[in-house]
Image (cartoon, rainbow, N blue to C red):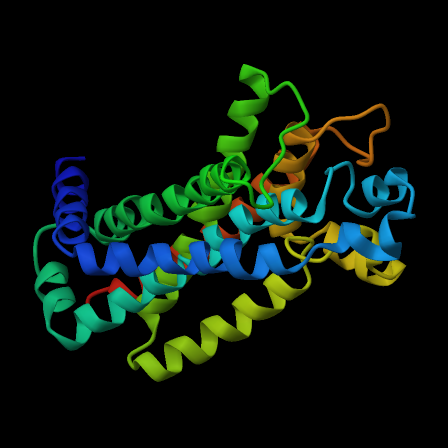
Amino acid sequence: MRELVALTRRELLRIARNPQAIVTSLLLPILYLVLFGQAFNLNSIGGGQVPPAYFLSLYRGAPNYFSYFSAGMAGFIAVTATLFIGANVIFDRLFGVLKRTAASPASATSIFGARLIAGSIQPIGLAFLVLGLAILLGRLGLAGLSVTASLTAVGAAEVVLAVVILSVMFASLFIAIGFSIQQPQTYFAVVNAINLPVLLTSAALYPWGTMPAWFQNVASYNPITLAVNVLRENLFAGAISYYPYDPAVYLLGLSGWAVAMFVIATLLARRALAPQR
């Protein structure tokens, strides 16, 4: 435990001492919300003649596309921000930092755990920054996130838990891949081969009602979809429920994904950090 705490503290200090990286990481969610999110005003379809019930069905209870998009962006950014956590492992290997850490008395579990704990903080923070910024934009007269449900303490806990699980599960996988791969070019090729299909087959950005049935079936089992379903069910409410299950069921499915991914990540990390004979 002492090794884990010491290594985690070191990783957090490295993040805090690099404010340029923090500022740069904030630009992506800001650009998505201010440019991409504001540009798509799908509620203007039909010149205002389309019944509001149509859009509620299209966005699964969200009052407008930006609100639907904002909740999805929280899940989207929680995943994309974890890509660079694994990349840091690659660069630490190139600069000899990882070799010195592996030669210390710290166990492989402590080394992996410290990077996972410290590295997960940033994507979790960015996800909630997206939600806060989306609400703020509405106060500034732009399209903004409209929370139409009475968010309870249980609902807030479910939202936080969904974001944390999603961030930690992908962070663990990408860190383990970083431990297992030697070159940055190979790392980014591998993680993009994982990251892009997962993102593009989720309901993070696409309006649910525009998807063909087969795509909805695929998206229903996607871990990002499971996480954003928890957010949307708790943020948007109406007389009709557009979700077949309660948020707790989606959290259970997301937890199953997390356990499977964490087992894979642990096996990869242990193999990569095992002493070379």
Query: Where 147 sits versus 269, above or below?
Result: above
Query: Where 109 sits versus 145, above or below?
Result: below
User: 225 or 27, which is in the foreground?
Assistant: 27
**Is residue 173 at all visible to an observer of this figure?**
yes
Residue 66 is left or right of residue 261, and the answer is: right
Which residue is located at x 43 percent, y 54 percent?
A: 30
Which image quarter: residue 185? bottom left
Query: Where 82 sits versus 124, above or below?
Result: below
Query: Where 68 sits versus 174, above or below?
Result: above
Which residue is located at x 48 percent, y 54 percent?
A: 77
Which image quarter: residue 86? bottom left
Which residue is located at x 30 percent, y 50 percent?
A: 119
Quadrant location of the N terminus?
A: top left
Residue 245 is left or right of residue 2, and the answer is: right
**Is residue 276 at all visible to an observer of this figure?**
no
User: 217 or 135, which is in the foreground?
Assistant: 135
Locate residue 114, reporting x and y percent: 24, 47
Count of numbered marks = 0
In the image as oriented, which residue stretches furthest toward the top?
Answer: 153
Residue 206 is left or right of residue 115, and the answer is: right
Residue 269 is left or right of residue 203, and the answer is: left
Locate residue 245, reporting x and y percent: 77, 32
Locate residue 222, reporting x and y percent: 67, 54
User: 38 or 124, which is in the foreground?
Assistant: 38
Locate residue 113, reporting x and y percent: 28, 47
Quadrant location of the C terminus?
A: bottom left
